[in-house]
Image: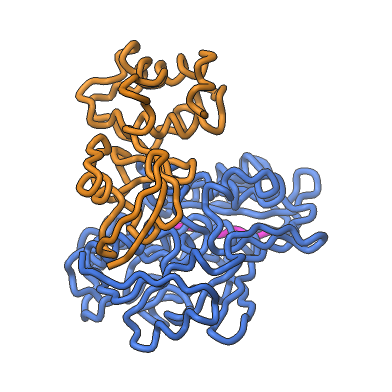
Chain colours: A orange, B blue
Amino acid sequence: MIQISFILNGKKVKLETDENRRLIDILREDFSLTGTKEGCSIGECGACTIIMNKLAVNSCLVLAGQLIDSEILTIEGVSENGKLNVLQENFLKYGAVQCGYCTPGMIMSIYALLLKNNNPADEEIKEAIAGNLCRCTGYKQIIDAARATADTDMITDLSQ
Amino acid sequence: MKNFKYIQPKSLSEVKKYFSDNHSVLYAGGTDVLGLVKKEVYNYENMIDLKSVPDLDKVEEVKGKGLKIGALVKISEIAESEIIKNKYTALSDAAQKVASPQIRNMATLGGNICQRPRCWYYRDDYACLRKDGDYCYAEEGENKYHAVIGGSPCFIVHPSDTAVALMALDAVFNIFDGNAEREVPISEFFVQPDEDVYLENILKPYEVLTSVFIPEQKNKVSRFIKFAERDVWDFAMASVAVKVEKNGNKITGGKIILGGVAPIPWYDEKINKGISGLTLDEKSIDEFSKLALQDAEPLSKNGYKITLARNLIKMILSEI
């Protein structure tokens, strides 16, 4: 067993767990944060994308021990008090959600991009979601939603 | 995945003591090791995470000499670095082509160089040569992604993009052996299967690649180009890194390294002999590219790699 403490969606958490558990297991099973989805389990599809220390990473490729002293943000952490953030609203508005399985990962990848670049070019948006597969192939709507979010002043809300 | 101990040594000198029984593995970003452990290609008892060892994640410019990149520097940091983009362009190009944005945010330079092969027989449940079996399943099997040169008796290709660029840039690796650090030129780092079929490089299990030094590339231009079936996540079917010095339209010296064609980043003798004096016009480049991989012995399904590598050489030289 390994003892780890880290920041999860703004709150300090502590956990004792088996060393061979992955971040996605810990999020879904120990913290009931089931917004993060498991797809391919090998870092190819991006469905499990979360933000670790301000960078988008695949939670299926992070071991428990790597969480020590890290800061994790999941899809549950981007909205506050049940109110969707502007990026989530734009996903709805632009029809960027079809079956929905890739959506949390897509949002986290775009969120990570907007954290460091609040005026990305379309090419930068495409690059940011290059590691996220959408089998409904709704990429255009997803890019539109990201573009619309970057264009609003409300983007400042994201980085707070 | 079987359980293991997760150990975070605080210094390099602590690392070796965890390797007395040989059931340990060094762990950096983990994007490769985790896959091997999950599929039980290896069952390690100890994961030795290097994160707490100080100074392995630094990039340091040594004035007038070159650039020192710590082994734990993330691939995304290399891909985004302006210094690397401007002065060591081939490495920047290669880093940008590694895997996906998410993986580049976890994966490290040291890990990218030391990652294990992607051969599906090796990764899957086959007792192949590299896993102490007595047969290379790729030689007569599904070998579309395998080596066309330098392969025998095991036909893996080296999966790293950054290693191909670093070889063109004449990088030097700093290696800690448990007591002291030594320098190894990249040209002496990788190991072909006919020398040792179990290893891809000279590192002993407890030896740590601590940093990569790239000598200053004064008056030199470098580039890297990669072809994969998918632009993201995929490994190279073939890649080319080139570094040249030019006088007008003529190359006066340089180096070309091929990736995705051999078990190590490949230095092709004929093409490297011919590069000095090459005039950069279409006809000369076309003739020149045919020098590459003349000694190749493709398997049943990977002959396309020879044409592909030659075409990549043409592309990269036309753009340089």
Seen at 46% across and 76% down, the residue is B191
Can you tell which quarter of the image residue A142 is in?
Answer: top left
Q: The N terminus of chain B is located in which quarter?
A: bottom left
A109 sits left or right of B34 in the view: right
Q: Relative to B89, is B118 above or below?
A: below
Q: Is residue B256 magenta?
A: yes
B242 sits left or right of A66 in the view: right
Q: The C terminus of chain B is located in which quarter?
A: top right
Q: Is residue B152 magenta?
A: no
Q: Relative to B160, is A81 above or below?
A: above
B221 sits left or right of A137 in the view: right
A160 sits left or right of B199 in the view: right
Residue B92 in sight: yes
Q: Relative to B54, is A105 above or below?
A: above
| Percent x, y of residue A95 | 30, 14
- Read off the magenta span: B254-259
Seen at 50% across and 16% down, the residue is A154
| Percent x, y of residue B261 | 42, 60
Name the one closer to the observer, A120 or A157: A157
